[in-house]
Image (spheres, rainbow, N blue to C red):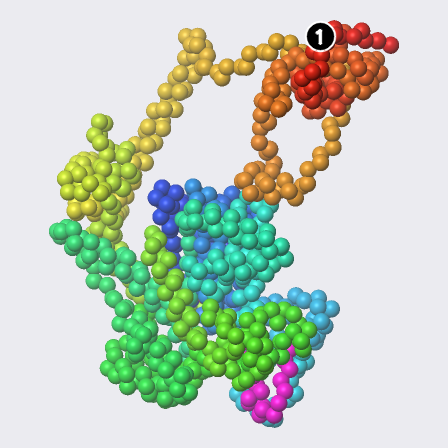
Amino acid sequence: MNAYTDASNALTPAAARAQRPELARLVHDAVRHQADTGCPQAIILSGVSGSGKTYASMVLLRRLFDVAGGGPETDAFKHLAAAFTVLRSLGAAGTLANSHSSRIGHFIEVQVTDGALYRTKIHCYFLDQTRVVRPPPGERNYHIFYQMLAGLAPDERLQLHLDGYTAQDLRYDVRPPPRRLAATSPPPPRHLIAAYIVRGAAGPAHAACARDAHALALYCRTVATIVRRANSLKRLGSTLGTLSSDSNDSVRDQDAASRRASTAGGRSRAGAQGMAALNDAVRHATDGFVGILDMFGFEDAAPSRLEHLCANLCAETMQHFYNTHVFKSSAESCREEGVAGALEVEYVDNVPCIDLVSSLRAGLLAALDAECAARGSPEHYVARIRTAHRGHPRLGEARPPHARRFAVRHYAGEVVYDAAEFLDANRDCVPDALLAAFDSRCCEFGFATHLFGAELKALAASGGATGALFRASPTALAPAGPAAPAAPASTLTQDFHTRLDNLLRTLVHARPHFVRCLRANAAETPMLFERAVVANQVRALQILETVQLMANGYPHRMRFRAFGARYRALWRRGERCAAGGAAGGAVEREAGAACARVLRAVAAAAAPPAPSSPAAVRWALGKRHVFLSEGMRQVLERMRRARRQAAAECIQAAWRRHRARAPRTAAPAPPQRPRPAPITGTPPPDPPGLPDPPDPPDKCDATLVKRTCSLFGLDLERPPPLPPSRAYTVSNGVKLGYPQQRVLAADWADESGALRLRAGDTVLALGAARRGHVAVQVLGRTVPVPHSVLAPPRALRPRAPPAAPPAPPVAPPAPHALT
Ligand SMILES: Nc1ncnc2c1ncn2[C@@H]1O[C@H](COP(=O)(O)OP(=O)(O)OP(=O)(O)O)[C@@H](O)[C@H]1O
């Protein structure tokens, strides 16, 4: 985490070579576990902003493709890497903490079946949209703006009205000085005139608000649309399926969005629906995934805004998920199963803080919704929460006290929030009159019309603007009714909360793997380790408590059956593996006793897991589970590896011995597959002088071939083997064996002209020759004659009417003239 470069570089080969072995092991473990059990796996990255979550997530993704996706040369990987490059431009910005901070959280869902990747979905969580119009002091806008200014060709700049501008001139790329937008404000620059059409007699402050709402709505809708478009591309030529997703839908509500996106694309409707149905069928047949979660890191910008409160709520939620999974559930299951002497680690529970922020009854976010509904003010909002949560241990005062500010004591430190923009940001509204400007009847910019399609439809149904408000960001609750509603059905924080809930619902069904990222210093300086900075993070992430649990507690538990399946190699010969399961009582007890015998033997034989490891080698038996210390898990794994290695070596040694002895003892050759018996009259190989006739031209449609291969998972480079040639032909259910008498339908001569046959000549066909040819015996020679010059075999001709005289006996082959 020292060479501070952009995180998307982690997808490059150089970064892949430098990747951490522990991340590689983690991916192997997740893929193996997914393949063994079918259970979804979630790799959850956490840490403060700038600690390397995004970097690690890219390394993990690359590794996942190496292990299960065919490597980085596949179309799917290239497509994904390209999508992430675009996403980084649109969603990363320079903050005080991190000059490439991801302002969009990601959950990358890599769907895997039988250990092979078949589809990737990116779920995006975009919060920090106010940055587009008001970057916080000292911070920067999204990378895309600077990249455009630095990289556009002169004619492109002209087209976008950006000619002559630099990053310093653009209003949205630098923090405007306060009150710059008053009446005395200078005329809007060209790029703003090009983008906005603001009519009416509103004051300048009003007009500036409208302009900002417009810009914000355009940006976040554009991001969502680009993400959806990039994710919905189907890679027909690829062996690795598709990428699909929507930036704002919940994790498990993606298919409809994916279908919407596909039908919006250039494909025919039927084709897209067919492909969506096929994808759905595959998905339902194989619902396993390996997910990589890179959400917002904890941030303490001073002062913080509503977006920071949401990001910190997300970090708190992930910390709570960790606490529950690692500390709480292991202690509870030990208690439930009567395991005596289990260590209960004391950890800091952050539920009070999550309650303070997100409780539906009186949490900070619920109070904000109430304040928005009552058209209140920031000061009134802060007074309201102070009254509601007086004395709450997690709610504090800003220092010095301020009417619009309050502090929250998060798990990773205290953060002071300024509520000045809370209400506007939460409403996230844009007036209908502004959106009416994008109506296709008056707007020539079709893309903008497309971005607000649902809203414009509602406006058309209401007969035009009525003073209603729409959400600026795309939302699952877009106006669906016939007319525009007076106010949006949800707020920014409600949407975020819903999506966070959906994400958690997905995570609780998965097996989690936690990656805790630590930032080495606060200044993005390479090779600098700041003790205090790291110690704070170690404390906040409860890493010491985790180590304590790993060293002395029982952090791992396995059902008896799962233990038996995994450590089958350690069972004594003749002893049955633990069965456990539904049979209950006696069977479960017997399975537990079998596990205990193995564990006792292992513990007696075991050396410490590693010379310097403090982890104790302990185990305990519960009612349904085996409880293991980290040390015992390591010992079991090491012994299992050793047994399997020894077994593999034993097999190899036996085989080598067998191979080495084979010539001396003249052992019988290994049985080979019997060759098919030669067919009577099989033509000998062609004489050396006989030239090959040219192959008929390939009449296949290349696109059709590609699609078929993609649909059936065939490899384009290696066609499936041809079926073995048959010793007969079949027609109308009649089998005609070779040799056959055939009559020539047309004159034919071989390439040299030495051999000539005439129409009506009868020849003896011996069997199939090269493509499109039949091997024919002529004057003691066998020559390939094209099918096309031979009349169909007799049995294939139309049947003669019953009254017709019987066919004359087949004449002997006619003499052939050799010239
Ligand atoms: N192992 C590493 N090797 C090289 N560079 C790294 C490594 N880890 C992180 N970095 C660099 O450190 C910087 C911060 O990393 P990154 O953006 O991944 O942090 P983050 O935790 O995702 O931050 P945020 O939450 O703000 O998005 C980036 O510029 C990244 O390229």
In screen coordinates, is 557 left or right of 121? left
Percent x, y for residue 679? Answer: 60, 11
Helix, strand or loop at label 1? It is: loop
Above or below, 690 against 95 in this view is above
Percent x, y for residue 406? Answer: 35, 82
Q: Label 1, on which residue?
A: 809
Q: Quadrant of the N terminus?
A: bottom left
Which quadrant holds residue 712?
A: top right
Check disc 1 and give the amino acid type: Pro
Above or below, 677 against 601 in this view is above
- Please report the residue visible at 66 percent of the width from the left and 66 percent of the height from the top: 151
Which is nearer the eye, 230 or 191? 230
Which is nearer the eye, 322 or 606? 322
Examine the structure image and report whether residue 227 is included in the region drawn in magenta.
Answer: no
**Residue 32 visible:** no
- Please report the residue visible at 51 percent of the width from the left and 48 percent of the height from the top: 278
**Residue 28 visible:** yes
Query: Where are the magenta residues, as a range?
Result: 195-219
Percent x, y for residue 537? Answer: 34, 65
- Please report the residue visible at 44 percent of the width from the left and 60 percent of the height from the top: 253
Which is nearer the eye, 321 or 21? 321
